Image (spheres, helix red, strand yellow):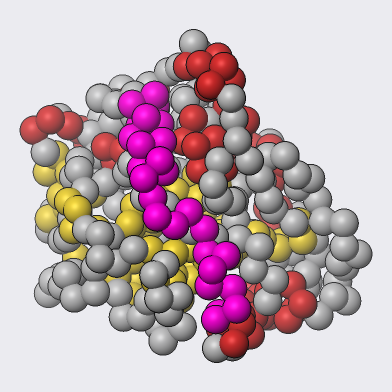
Amino acid sequence: MHFSTALISAFAATLVAAHPGANVEEEAQERRGFLSTAKRTNLDHCSAQIKARGLGKTAALRRRTLMENKAKRGVVAQRDLADLNKSHHSDADYDTTTPLDTLFEKEKSCVLAPETTEGPYYVAGEFIRHNVAENEPGVPLTLDLAIYDVETCDPITDTWVQIWSCNSTGIYSGVPSGADYTPAPENLKTTFLRGFQQTDASGAAQFETLFPGHYSGRTQHVHVAVHPTGSATPRANGTIDEATVSHVGQFYFDQALSDEVERLAPYSANAQPLTANADDRLLLADLATSDPIVEYVLLGETVADGLLAWFSFGVNMTATREARVAATYYEGGGVATPEEE
């Protein structure tokens, strides 16, 4: 999928800041710069090897187990998630009798999510934990991530992965910022919706989180960072303070799904302007070369009962850099870096 210069320019005319101290257009320019020189922009070249090694079946079994453990009344719905030029509803006749292996071995999202900007909400010193929701209200979201080496097509094992996202009303933990980018230094003491997990022998990691809310200038998304194997060391207090990354990316959700969630409380109480997928600068850049939208199933009769979502992506583990750290969490609270205060 490609977008014309005129279309991108038209979006730029209505640009708003996505983070305090940052600009979506600047982030999008960084994104386009990376894509223009990236050697690989998807995992098509790995499809045969992934299938031959049985990694698709391994993923299917893993996701089936997650589903059976969490679903309230079985698989109720499944949507075929693709880029914005395609239907977000499956043309297959999936229902509650569809074998789960049929659903979960389907790897349409097995694409490279290339390096992108982390924005100024990256926090070092996050906790190692499977469940990052804490006491935040919202729609439960179980994430299954599978990570491959884009050069060798091997699963990346025993490496640390972290995720972070805003809560249902568009606020990030661990940084001195509140809704609509208002100063909120007390927020440095919070840790919700952030955490680390280590990949297993299949290159997979799972998180229990919440469906993210929205904030001005960005559609709903979750950030993910992959650290070079051996670079991240757990601390005695169960956290990891590491800013060296091999990949920083974001993944997204079907627009119809986001719309459903936004009609629920407490998401519906968020007064910040909504940005649709079609108007998000960074998502549009990703869609030019890959499909960064998760596949998912419902875990009950309605979206409110929760979701299981899965996403696979490739990482060039030989390419490393230092992430821009907004704050570092220590025992008793976070400390903002000077440029983010």
Question: What percent of the width, then of the height, locates residue 113?
Answer: 47, 54
- Residue farthest to the right? 93
Judge left or right: residue 224 versus residue 11. Answer: left
Q: Nearer the viewer, residue 327 or 88?
A: 88
Q: Is residue 64 above or below residue 232?
A: below
Please name the predominant secondary structure of the magenta segment in the image.
Answer: helix
Give the farthest residue toward the left: 338
Q: Which residues are magenta?
A: 24-50
Return the residue nearer the eye: 42 or 175.
Answer: 42
| Residue 271 place in picture, x, y as percent | 53, 23
Residue at left 47%, top 25%?
A: 217
> Which residue occupies 73% across, 81% down?
101
Q: Quadrant of the image for the N terminus?
A: top right
Q: Specify whether 274 is left or right of 332.
A: right
Q: Say if residue 74 shows up in the picture.
A: yes
Residue 269 visible? The answer is no
Horizontally, residue 216 falls left or right of residue 230, namely right
